[in-house]
Image (cartoon, rainbow, N blue to C red):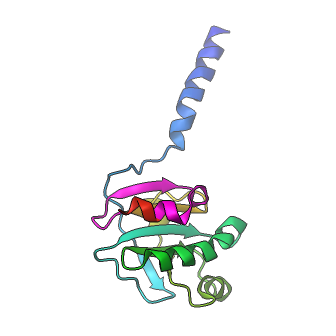
Amino acid sequence: MKRIMLIIAMLTATAWTLDAQRLSIGERVPELNISKWLTDAPSLDGKAVMVEFFHSSNQKSIDRLRTLDDLARKGGNKLAVVVVTKEDSPEVGAMLTEGAPAYSVGYDAGSTFPDFEARYVPYAVLYDKRGRILWVGNPTTMKNEDIIGMLK
């Protein structure tokens, strides 16, 4: 019985590390590797960047598009908002670019999702103009004002 309890305790103790986030606040952000831009490529020089990962099968991702457009407009010259998707289809492209949004949209070249550890959507990484991570996680937990406030 003690052996079984020890095995259960070890599995429980290590299970959370398997899914743990390796991106850490203050570290340099991975390279944003985009194969094709659906919009104009963003100018990232001298700006903080919010990279949000998207998939059309997730309603929260779809619902966030309007919020991301608002964030990109409010961010002005201080913040670039980039939406990254793996879905290279005309329907998804039309959904992401409907209404000429202020955010940029790019297709993952194959390494951006894994490099940024995007295992679920919506998922975002916010980093400063020096490329240092400010925040990582589920963007539905933050208001646009909070994100803008982190840039000061």
**Residue 36 screen position, x and y as percent:** 46, 84
Residue 134 included in the magenta stretch of the image: yes
In the shown orientation, is residue 65 left or right of residue 36?
A: right
Q: Is residue 70 above or below residue 101?
A: above
Of 71 and 60, which appears nearest the observer? 71
Residue 54: quadrant of the picture: bottom right
Q: Is residue 99 visible?
A: yes
Of 97 and 150, which appears nearest the observer? 150
**Residue 62 screen position, x and y as percent:** 67, 73
Residue 120: quadrant of the picture: bottom right
Q: Is residue 105 visible?
A: no
Residue at the image point whose x is 36% and y is 74% from the top: 78
User: Farthest top residue?
Assistant: 2
Q: State the extent of the magenta-drawn residues as a range.
A: 128-147
In the shown orientation, is residue 114 left or right of residue 8?
A: left
**Residue 114 screen position, x and y as percent:** 47, 60
In the shown orientation, is residue 128 left or right of residue 119?
A: left
Which part of the image, by quadrant, shows the C terminus? bottom left
Residue 40: quadrant of the picture: bottom left
Which part of the image, by quadrant, shows the N terminus? top right
